Image: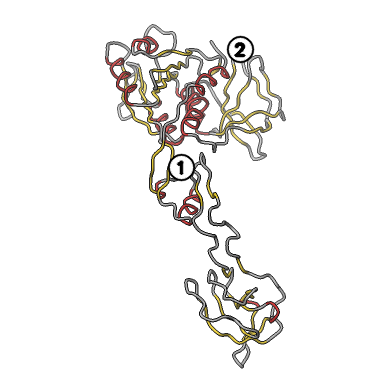
Amino acid sequence: MISFDEAYNIVMDSAFQTGSELIPFTKAAGRILAEDIHSDIDMPPFNRSAVDGYACRKSDLSKDLEIVEVIPAGKEPVKEVQVGQCSKIMTGAIVPEGCDIVFMVEDSEILPSGLVRFAGSNLKTNISLRGEDVKKGDRVLERCKQVMPQDIAVLASVGHVMVLVSKKPDIAVISTGDEIVEPEMVPLRSQIRNSNAYQLLSQISQAGGTGKYYGIAPDTGNKAYDIIMKAVSENDIVILTGGVSMGDFDFIPSFLEKAGVKILFSRINVQPGKPTTFGIHTRTLVFGLPGNPVSSFIQFETLIKPLIDKMTGSAWRQKSFMMKMGVKYERKSASRMGWVPVKINEKNEIVPVEYHGSAHITSLSYSDGIIAIMPEIKTLEKGKEVEFMPF
């Protein structure tokens, strides 16, 4: 049995890059950039009015000004503004030559003669200068960044309509066990519904992978072996749940070895998640996760999600941060590192949720994340800082 840190390092050291692909920028949200993005224009591309108002020379603000033209957004100014003149201008329009200030409509007074007067006190120029935000050739988005909705606007603004992104890893999910039935079925007394597969498929999607469900593999016969071989041949990562403990019918490790998977570890000194198995088949990474849903959920969050980040080159995700305990917490056994589901209270403190063990999946629905308690530590005092990992 190895420590969690040892298991984490083995998994991370086994990562490989997924490659890249070119996709339309409209489909890039959530993907990881595989290139730097540079601007093909200055932004703003011209001296632009930031308000609806009147463009003139600052030295003429004390004068009654002749309006020489009206400049809407999207139209070129026709006239250069001379001394004693101004142009009425709309937000986003090009500021005409000769002007170094735009005073707002709210600060103006139209005289009976048709002239306009500055009637305010705010001398803010209200002009966005050409290139003050971005200059042509500037890097606007960095390689390895996850594309957010606001980044889609940046891509559109610089005309980068085809984007090079990391390929999503293809990830197989296989449930195991003769006692498992699909959710739409009414389970017999000795059966349970398959929750792990659909939980994992959702986690994979959220983490930036492409999940594919391969069904339920029975405990006996060749079907489990055939399913594993098919999944290994078609995917970058294979995740099996169940069948990795020490029971008489936990045959997954032997099936993996028969399939040619080199097992790198099969026990981690954590609770929950001790019987987690990891191995490699050529370029496919294979995980055997415990069958209890909390165990499989947490092992995905702590081992497989960061693996997906590394494989796709992601430099984005917030891994963890320090927060204070809102209550005193004690656990029964301190022999293993413990993952504890917690929530954040109204004082921005950490409070463990009601949690009965690794089968208590509903506890996670009321959790904001988990904290880790190191081996040999049994008590966390109120006010102690702990490392919090959000889901």
Of the residues under marks 2 and 1, which one precedes in the sequence?
A: 1
| SS class, disc 2 | loop
Q: Is residue 95 above or below residue 83?
A: above
Residue 188: name its quadrant.
Answer: top left
Label 1 amino acid? Answer: Gly
The reply to whether discs 2 and 1 touch (Cβ–Cβ < 8 Å) is: no
Residue 131 location (% of width, % of height):
58, 60
Of residues 273 and 57, the one drawn nearer to the viewer in this rendering: 57
Separation of residues labelled 2 and 1 (CA atoms): 39 Å
Of residues 371 and 170, the one drawn nearer to the viewer in this rendering: 170
Residue that appears at 43% across and 20% down: 287
Q: Is residue 384 left or right of residue 303?
A: right
Residue that appears at 45% across and 36% down: 206
Crowding at label 1, few (<14), some or many (≥20) Cα neighbours within 10 Å? some
How many numbered marks does the figure carry? 2
Crowding at label 2, few (<14), some or many (≥20) Cα neighbours within 10 Å? some
Residue 283 location (% of width, % of height):
39, 22
Residue 117 location (% of width, % of height):
66, 84
| SS class, disc 1 | loop
Q: Residue furthest top?
A: 248
Q: Residue furthest bottom?
A: 113
Residue 333: name its quadrant.
Answer: top right
Of residues 10 and 298, the one drawn nearer to the viewer in this rendering: 10
Residue corresponding to mark 2: 335
Q: Is residue 205 left or right of residue 72?
A: left
Residue corresponding to mark 1: 30
